[in-house]
């Protein structure tokens, strides 16, 4: 089973310069391959394979000598990335590949010649790079992905294979339905409501001040570069706080339950609502469901997604009576058939749990 361990690394001045050059070469080759593949496809109806892209490297290195400075395997991995991006596009798992930009997160991957030796990470051409190891990895090191954030911090994601198979999932045990919301982040079928910290709203004023200061700086100046880093640090703070909250909540739900049922939400369509778009984006529902899914697989638990068109909020969990219409401002309603008062969110979580159980019995 593959697991990644992410560590903060601290390269020296020379190593940072070499990494900056490597990031630029990998980004340039990726964009070059993307543009050439697109042009080839439009003219001939066929794209370029991974081997075709890799075979371009010897000729490009003769024409552009600076391509020989980064490790050659990093450029080869860029060819693998562009071929995977087109494969995901044609299989409708992702959008059409886009060009990489210098101002975004930069990364490159080392598949060979790597080793984690104590507090140092050994990489090709870079040598020993100091690494802050927070926990010791288990298994065999397969690859290392070095990335640089917009704030100038360097991280290394070490992919390890522990040699174990994924545990077989079992549905025997406690099952729980989870309904995601904005007022309360997660409402479970047992009546528990987990609050929504709303980290973007918390740091929104600070972010606005930093962005206002950035907009006043002259483009290309050193002061603008400093202001840009300040804006990036606020965004990084928000992302880290949100990720920490989602990790803790998902771990709690996975540890306490055997079967976890979540509604499959169409977040892409929901953010089109101008009044709720910022709050929905701040919630990070997609990231939370991803965490629940892989943590359930690692722990041998069962993760189930209910169809997004299933009217879980409108169906009474007691008598199965369905309400014709239920606007978002109505948080609780009284069933016309059994005359019980139902909390909208708790009822939705309970219906998700019941839906999964009925599907298992019927299947």
Image (spheres, rainbow, N blue to C red):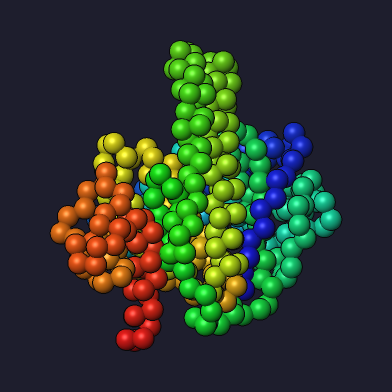
Residue 184 vertical position relative to residue 294 in the rendered view, above or below:
above
Q: What is the residue that sits farthest to the left in this orientation? A: 324
Closer to us: 195 or 294:
195
Question: 98 left or right of 14?
Answer: left
- Relative image position of residue 72 (x, y in whole percent): 62, 54
- Image quadrant containing the N terminus: bottom right
In the rendered image, is residue 173 in sight? yes
Residue occupying the point 73% across, 70% down:
139
- Image quadrant containing the C terminus: bottom left
Q: What is the residue that sits farthest to the front in this orientation? A: 339
- Relative image position of residue 205 (x, y in whole percent): 48, 23
Residue 82 vertical position relative to residue 293 in the rendered view, above or below:
above
Residue occupying the point 32% across, 40% down:
276
- Relative image position of residue 206 (x, y in whole percent): 52, 24
Residue occupying the point 77% across, 52% down:
133
- Relative image position of residue 70 (x, y in whole percent): 63, 47
Question: 218 left or right of 43?
Answer: right
In the rendered image, is residue 51 in sight? no
Count of marks overlaid on the render: 0
| Quarter residue 9 falls in | top right
Closer to us: 321 or 340:
340
Residue 340 vertical position relative to residue 257 in the rendered view, above or below:
above
Closer to us: 343 or 341:
341
Residue occupying the point 43% across, 64% down:
189
Q: What is the residue that sits farthest to the right in this orientation? A: 118
């Amino acid at each position: 089973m593959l697991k990644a361990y992410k560590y903060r690394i601290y390269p020296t001045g020379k190593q940072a310069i070499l990494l900056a050059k490597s990031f630029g070469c990998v980004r340039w080759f990726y964009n070059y391959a993307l543009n050439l593949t697109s042009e080839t496809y439009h003219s001939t109806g066929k794209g370029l394979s991974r081997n075709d892209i890799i075979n371009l490297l010897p000729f490009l290195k003769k024409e552009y000598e600076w391509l020989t400075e980064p490790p050659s395997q990093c450029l080869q991995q860029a060819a693998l990335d562009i071929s995977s991006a087109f494969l995901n596009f044609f299989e409708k798992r992702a959008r059409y590949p886009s060009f990489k930009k210098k101002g975004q997160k930069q990364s490159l991957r080392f598949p060979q010649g790597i080793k984690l030796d104590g507090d140092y990470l050994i990489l090709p051409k870079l040598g020993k790079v100091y690494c802050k190891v927070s926990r010791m990895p288990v298994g065999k090191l397969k690859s290392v992905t070095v990335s640089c954030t917009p704030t100038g911090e360097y991280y290394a994601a070490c992919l390890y294979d522990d040699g174990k198979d994924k545990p077989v999932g079992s549905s025997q045990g406690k099952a729980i339905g989870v309904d995601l919301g904005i007022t309360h982040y997660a409402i479970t079928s047992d009546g528990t409501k987990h609050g929504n910290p709303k980290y973007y709203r918390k740091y929104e004023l600070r972010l606005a001040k930093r962005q206002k200061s950035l907009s006043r700086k002259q483009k290309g100046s050193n002061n603008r570069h400093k202001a840009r880093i300040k804006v990036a640090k606020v965004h990084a703070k928000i992302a880290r706080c949100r990720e920490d909250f989602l990790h803790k909540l998902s771990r709690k739900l996975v540890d306490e339950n055997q079967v976890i049922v979540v509604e499959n939400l169409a977040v892409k369509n929901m953010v089109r609502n101008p009044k709720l778009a910022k709050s929905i984006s701040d919630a990070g529902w997609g990231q939370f469901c991803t965490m629940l899914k892989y943590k359930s697989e690692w722990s041998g638990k069962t993760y189930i997604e209910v169809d997004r068109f299933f009217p879980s909020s409108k169906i009474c969990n007691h008598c199965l009576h369905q309400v014709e219409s239920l606007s978002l401002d109505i948080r609780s309603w009284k069933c016309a058939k059994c005359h019980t008062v139902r909390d909208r969110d708790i009822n939705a979580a309970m219906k998700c749990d019941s839906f999964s159980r009925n599907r298992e019995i019927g299947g």
